[in-house]
Amino acid sequence: MITNLIKRYIKSIQVVLVLITLSSCASRKDLVYFQDEPLNDQMILDTKFELKYQTNDILTIDVSALDPELARPFNLSAVSNNNSSSLNAQSNLIRQTYLVDPDGNIEFPVLGTFAIGGMTRAQATVKLKETLSEYIKDPIVNIRLINFTVTVLGEVNKPGTYTVQDERISLPEALGLAGDLTIYGQRTNVFLIREVDGKKRFAKLDLTSISVVGSPLYYLAQNDVLVIEMNNAKVRQSSYNQNSGVIIAAISTLATIAAILIR
């Protein structure tokens, strides 16, 4: 009689352990990207994304011409780096940059206040060329944003803030920089924070749907923040001791051994 009770008790423990294990597992539907439908030839993706300059952007602007002397006044001169221990005079120089102020302006040599906020690089280049043409014949203008960063937080393998060199980055590329989502990342509810006209805007993206590829949010803007929420499996796991997995495995092993010995 006692032996039968023990056997039933052991079987109950084993069933409970199995249920706990299954409840912490995520399904394929929760983990696979872009799963709802394949791309086809009729789907046209927007690949013409261009960032627009905004407050606190840091830019380098180079002006050149056939006659370098005519272009020289329109370029910022390098300044000495007093903290450098190098004996090389050239390496002691720091290149100056332009900071976009809260009104969307920069202070440009000779030209003075120059509005650039809200423009794409192509638009700003054309406008600057037109203005410089009054002083220089056929000016060449090269503008580059040097503080394009995106931040990825939450359930990724390498959370942090990343500098983007190409001035354009897609959602999957940003997640790639962060080492991809962990198995506990909520792929159907990726939170995007973006600043537009000085105000924070929020959106949620579903990485399991192919429609995200055609979304206007597929390409990230400078200073975007992605927050990856933990899925239900991680929430349940965090509700009990982190060593519970080891404890469950040990109990399961002991229950199995006991069942064998009682037979």
Image: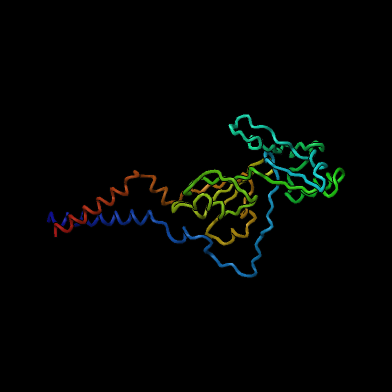
Residue pictured at 26% horizontal, 56% vertical: 14
**Coordinates of residue 260 in the picture (x, y in percent):** 17, 59
Residue pictured at 69% horizontal, 42% vertical: 59
The residue sitting at the left extreme is: 1
**Coordinates of residue 35 in the picture (x, y in percent):** 52, 63
Foreground: 129 or 238?
129
The answer to whether 73 is drawn above or below residue 256 in the figure is: above
Residue pictured at 60% horizontal, 30% vertical: 83
**Left or right: residue 139 compared with residue 236:** right
Specify the quadrant that holds the C terminus. Answer: bottom left
Specify the quadrant that holds the N terminus. Answer: bottom left
**Coordinates of residue 11 in the picture (x, y in percent):** 23, 57
Foreground: 232 or 3?
232
The residue sitting at the right extreme is: 134
Foreground: 154 or 236?
154
Residue pictured at 19% horizontal, 55% vertical: 257
The residue sitting at the top extreme is: 82
Foreground: 31 or 18?
31
Count of marks overlaid on the render? 0
